[in-house]
Amino acid sequence: KAGVTQTPRYLIKTRGQQVTLSCSPISGHRSVSWYQQTPGQGLQFLFEYFSETQRNKGNFPGRFSGRQFSNSRSEMNVSTLELGDSALYLCASSPGQGIRNGYTFGSGTRLTVV
Amino acid sequence: AQSVTQLDSHVSVSEGTPVLLRCNYSSSYSPSLFWYVQHPNKGLQLLLKYTSAATLVKGINGFEAEFKKSETSFHLTKPSAHMSDAAEYFCVVSPPAGGSYIPTFGRGTSLIVHP
């Protein structure tokens, strides 16, 4: 059974650019949640998509957005990158909405903004 | 409202000795609680979860945790540490079904295992 796949694994971008990260969930999982992990703030919830609809959103600026496709794959986009956006971005898939059903995490995308 | 506090940022043990990672939570409802482990440059892996069934929860790799409502704690233990247990551990609190579904992660405890 394939796990959660995040691409790319590593990214280096320049301040002001935009970036798109991809997450392919486990087959049959309908929910994808995104997290930002930094040494200073720990793991912070970005948003959750379930059945192609954003169901929950964390406290991040509008530069952070996402979407989910009919096959449950999800993308997140960050526009006008800032140095502080450097982080490990993790996605987690689950069969139903929320963590109660059990999250399976991907290995993450390491974004470095220079 | 909910919050979770991992009482130690670092825990250092010798291989073969017991492990105790402490977690206290605050919640205005009966929460679900989880422990996840993260090895370097990896995603998080579920160790165990409590969802209002048995208060003593057994997880993978010999870990277990006990839910103590009176102490609002959910400490993670293992009788004998192995070198491969060295990693970052996260305690997580989540609202019950029907809530906002947004979990709160602790800041993490780094477990160091000495040979």
Image (spheres, rainbow, N blue to C red):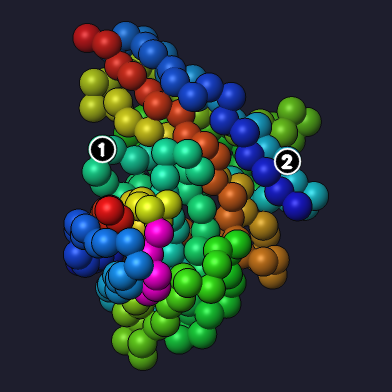
Residue A86 included in the magenta stretch of the image: no
Q: Amino acid at mark 2?
A: Ser
Assess disc 1: are there few (<14), some (14-19) or many (≥20) residues with their C-alpha within 10 Å of its C-alpha: few
Residue drawn where x is 70% and y is 66% of the image: B99
Q: Position of residue B38 (x, y in %)?
A: 34, 40
Residue at image location 52% in from the left, 37% down from the top:
B107
- Left-right relation of A30 to A71: right
- Residue at image location 69% in from the left, 70% down from the top: B98
Q: CA distance from mark 2 to mark 1?
A: 29 Å
From the top left corner, tell me how far across and down residue A40 is, in percent. 47, 39
Residue B26, label in figure:
2
Name the subunit of mark 1: B
Q: Which mark is residue B40?
A: 1
Q: Is residue B14 visible?
A: yes
Q: Nearer the viewer, residue B111 or A17?
A: A17
State the image coordinates of residue A30 (x, y, percent, origin top left). 42, 78
Answer whether residue A81 is magenta in the image.
Answer: yes
Q: Position of residue B55 (x, y in %)?
A: 62, 38
Look at discs 2 and 1 and give the one toward the viewer: 1
> Is B72 on the left-hand or right-hand side of A1?
right
The residue tagged with tag 1: helix, strand or loop? Answer: loop
Up the image or down, B70 lies above or below B103; here it is above
Find the magenta span and give its range. A77-82
Q: Which mark is residue A1?
A: none
Report the magenta stretch's main SS. Answer: loop
- Labels 2 and 1 in the same subunit: yes
> Does residue B22 sit above or below A18 in this rendering?
above
Residue B56 in the figure: left or right of residue B114 = right
Q: Secondary structure at mark 2?
A: strand
Give the crowd class for mark 2: few <14, some 14-19, many >=20 residues within 10 Å. Answer: some
Q: Hey, which quadrant is residue A13 in on the image?
A: bottom left
